[in-house]
Amino acid sequence: MKKYINKLFVLGSLLFLAASCETDGQLTTLATVTFPSAIEVSSSTIVLKEDVSDQQTLLVSWPKVTYPIAAPVTYALQFDLTNDIKGSEAWGKAKRVEVGEDVLSKAFTVFELNKIATELGLKPNVAGELVIRVESTMDHRIYSTPVTITVTPYEKVVVFGEIYMPGSYQGWGIETAAALKEIQVGIFQGYMTLPEGAGPGFKINRERGWAQFFGAGATNSDLKNMSDTDLTLPGAGSYQIKVNLNTLKWTATAYSWGIVGTATAGSWDASTPMSYDHQTKTWKITTTLAPGALKFRLNNSWDVNYGPADSSTNTINLGNQASYSIGEAGTYEVTFTINEVDPVSNGYPATATCTIVKK
């Protein structure tokens, strides 16, 4: 009898395992998942020029990959050289660009593609081949069939120039106007705050003088040499200003560092924006703080934030989860100083500095 009971137990176990395997068959790791069609590029031959480096030059798009389970699919792009996509080290040197969940295209500016090409080893002013493939991830990764494009990169020129931005926000004094630094040939970038009640008008001057300036052209986005019509900002607030003298265009993008944490009015949910002092190149705020935590982040988002690795110092570190501890309620002056760089080209520096002083 015992022998028959054991046989029945084994048979039941096998039936259970079979049923389990049938259920597990729904897992995507056991299913064949592929790209349903080829990826596409907007151009297969591209000659890159630095004077239009902020313009779009390449659009890569791909079909949706369908997995057996309904969940977000994460996509990324890989770029590599033709000689590096075969063998045991295939794609090991590839430049990977994260795209996001359920996003089916990615655009690249001239600058971005030039950076990828030169970092992979293509020589300036010489046509070379780049291979592109799309990576799709849910619980495992699959890759599209690669496509090849021909790219002629340029050699980046080191630039050190400045232009200036006199306007109503600082009384039109050219000597105290905000400076915009040259970040690429003919392209300038800087920061400023338009206070509440100040007029929105300004000009762009090549020197700290009025011998030559740019005002508004056909539209507010156009620069026109010696135009008496003021360029205008959207309204009160802090902005990243970018001027392209190659194309005679300019943009103002809302841009503000702020304080966040339980010591601030918005706690962890909403940053309290700081104002930019363009003369000292420092972000500042005087505000009431409660006992609690305080750190710094950009544009009311956690994408870029700084916290102290050592809270006994004024040095704060990119992406650090720590915060300063405010021990006593009161009015404080808080400053934040960072060596701003173009986030498209070089990202943000590893450290910044701050002061927190009770008034």
Image (cartoon, rainbow, N blue to C red):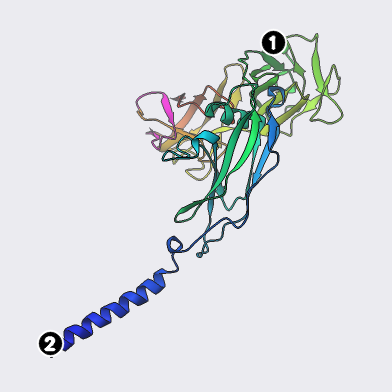
Kindly state the secondary structure of the residue where label 1 is placed.
helix
In front of the other: 92 or 347: 92
Report the residue at 81% width, 30% height from top: 220
Label 2: element kind: helix
Q: Which residues are magenta?
A: 312-327
In which quadrant of the rendered view does residue 190 lie?
top right
Relative height, residue 237 to residue 243 (above, below): below
Q: Nearer the viewer, residue 281 or 23?
A: 23
Q: Quadrant of the N terminus?
A: bottom left
Residue 300 percent location from the top left of the image: 55, 40
Q: Earlier in the sequence, mark 1 or mark 2?
A: 2
Residue annotated with mark 2: 2
Vertical arrangement, residue 154 with respect to residue 306, above or below: above
Distance, label 1 to label 2, CA atoms, is: 101 Å
Say which residue appears at 73% left-offset and 18% top-offset: 166
Q: Amino acid at mark 1?
A: Glu
Taking depth in this image into account, of 275 and 301 the one nearest to the observer is 301
Residue 108 x %, y %: 64, 36
Instruction: Quickly name the residue at label 1.
Output: 175
